[in-house]
Image (spheres, grey):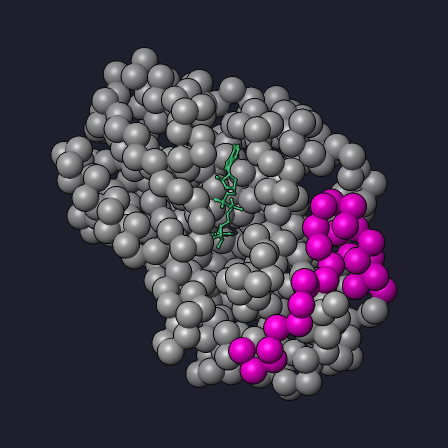
């Protein structure tokens, strides 16, 4: 894995006019003003930030923006799935109007996936869309949520207390994504591990050598070593953006990136399971392997390999309790990926090979939930 000091990846979409510059390096928060000034015409910006880092990383960005002659408002937001809501988006519209933001924006989303998803939807829809800059401060945000243009919020499922994950959203590509690896050094280990779950997912879909590299380098995959992970993060950005460029609106290969997510979305909003998104993805990867075994598509050795790696990365392999099957199936059927109420699963066949299965038998889903139940 090459660890360059700084990497820039230009993601060019099929329409020639659209591209997104992804900058990865150390100290980028302190240079964010200069970088953003080259990309937007307005000098009035709203920074929507995670309230946990409003006094630290957001201040570093605000100072840099002020040095680049921006007038910037900081709008903090608590990062939890309940706040990833239409109400939060409406609150952001109010803050944008209070600040006098016009169509030139920009909205700067600074935080993890909860912030970039919610602020991204506000930017996608305010005045029919204003420029968005993402500054992810979690590993999951860097390798996944802040790139690719998906924005969205949760919405209650009818007749249920459960939140339907990301049911309301829009595709709105950021103009740029700035990834300051130094910001990761303050990330709690539990959330660093959540980002590693998406990295394992990428490796399973597209890069068997990456899976081997992660198995051999677990000790370097920790927040205190994050400044050395520029090359690692860049590889995951490449994997994700390669699928997004080929299929921005997810009608084909982009859906491979949902590996583990149909299971994850069905379990992660259940409060009794106490799961963060990345933890639910880790369990979803194991569940997808088990479903593949039931369907005769996946060798059991793949699940054994994952079950050995995930705990070493700080990720779970079992649920705290078995969720009711009827509720799991109902949540999976209402997942965005399902078609006409029929579940769609992405099955890992081998490291680097996945297949889409529509309408798997309920027994395959049952076998998958069994495999991750206590
Ligand atoms: N849009 C997409 O393509 C996409 C892809 C994957 C996940 N997601 C979404 O992303 C969300 C999960 O994102 P996440 O894992 O980044 O979680 P998150 O946004 O909840 O952040 C995790 C925790 O870390 C804290 N935090 C963030 N940055 C920090 C830092 N530098 N130092 C200290 N603490 C910090 C936050 O306050 C929070 O407690 C989910 O809602 C998921 O649906 C979206």
Asked if residue 95 is among those painted magenta in the image, a careful observer would answer no
Left or right of 208 on screen, residue 198:
left
- Visible residue check, residue 331: yes
User: Do we see residue 133 in this rendering?
Assistant: no
For the C terminus, the image quarter is bottom right
Q: Position of residue 286 (x, y in %)?
A: 72, 64
Q: Could you say where residue 225 lies in the image, as x and y percent from the top left?
A: 69, 27
- In what quadrant of the picture does the N terminus appear? top right
Q: Quarter of the image holding residue 295? A: bottom right
Q: How many marks?
A: 0
Height in image: 306 above or below 64?
below
Q: Give coordinates of residue 321: x percent, y percent.
A: 67, 68
Give the quadrant of residue 360: bottom right
Classify residue 223 as left or right of residue 266.
right
In this view, the residue farthest toward the top is 67
Please name the residue shown 37% across and 68% down the image.
Answer: 156
At a point 68% along the width and 63% down the height, the residue shown is: 319
Q: Is residue 310 magenta?
A: yes
In the depicted structure, whether residue 178 falls above or below residue 11: above
Name the residue nearer the viewer: 354 or 270. Answer: 270
Spot occupied by residue 122 in the image (x, y as percentages of width and height) = 28, 48
Q: Is residue 43 left or right of residue 292?
A: left
Query: In the image, which residues are magenta?
Result: 301-327
Q: What residue is drawn where x is 45% and y is 63%?
A: 165
In the image: residue 181, left or right of residue 58: right
């Amino acid at each position: 894995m090459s660890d360059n000091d700084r990497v820039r990846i230009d993601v060019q979409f099929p329409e020639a006019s659209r591209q997104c510059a992804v900058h990865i390096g150390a100290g980028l928060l302190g240079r964010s003003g200069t970088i953003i000034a080259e990309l937007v015409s307005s000098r009035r910006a709203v920074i929507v930030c995670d309230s946990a880092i409003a006094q630290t990383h957001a201040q570093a960005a605000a100072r840099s923006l002020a040095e680049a002659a921006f007038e910037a408002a900081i709008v903090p937001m608590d990062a939890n799935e309940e706040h990833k809501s239409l109400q939060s988006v409406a609150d952001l519209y109010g803050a944008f109007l209070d600040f006098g933001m016009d169509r030139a924006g920009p909205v700067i989303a600074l935080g993890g996936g909860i912030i970039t998803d919610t602020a991204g939807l506000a930017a996608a829809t305010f005045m029919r869309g204003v420029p968005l800059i993402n500054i992810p401060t979690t590993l999951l945000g860097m390798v996944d949520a802040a790139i690719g243009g998906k924005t969205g919020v949760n919405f209650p499922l009818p007749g249920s207390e459960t939140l339907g994950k990301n049911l309301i959203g829009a595709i709105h590509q950021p103009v740029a994504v700035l990834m300051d690896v130094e910001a990761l050094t303050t990330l709690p280990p539990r959330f660093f591990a959540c980002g590693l779950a998406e990295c394992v997912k990428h490796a399973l879909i597209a890069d068997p050598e990456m899976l081997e590299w992660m198995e051999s380098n677990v000790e370097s995959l920790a927040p205190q070593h994050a400044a050395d992970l520029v090359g690692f993060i860049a590889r995951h950005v490449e994997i994700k953006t390669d699928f997004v460029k080929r299929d921005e609106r997810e009608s084909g290969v982009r859906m491979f990136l949902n590996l583990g997510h149909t299971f994850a979305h069905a379990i992660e909003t259940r409060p009794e399971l106490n799961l963060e998104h990345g933890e639910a993805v880790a369990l979803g990867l194991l569940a997808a392997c088990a479903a593949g075994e039931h369907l005769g598509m996946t060798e059991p050795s793949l699940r054994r390999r994952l079950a050995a790696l995930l705990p070493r990365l700080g990720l779970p392999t079992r649920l705290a309790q078995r969720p009711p099957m009827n509720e799991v199936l109902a949540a999976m059927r209402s997942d965005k990926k399902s078609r006409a109420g029929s579940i769609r699963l992405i099955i890992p066949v081998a490291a680097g090979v996945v297949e889409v299965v529509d309408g798997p038998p309920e027994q395959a889903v049952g076998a998958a939930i069994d495999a991750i139940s206590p």
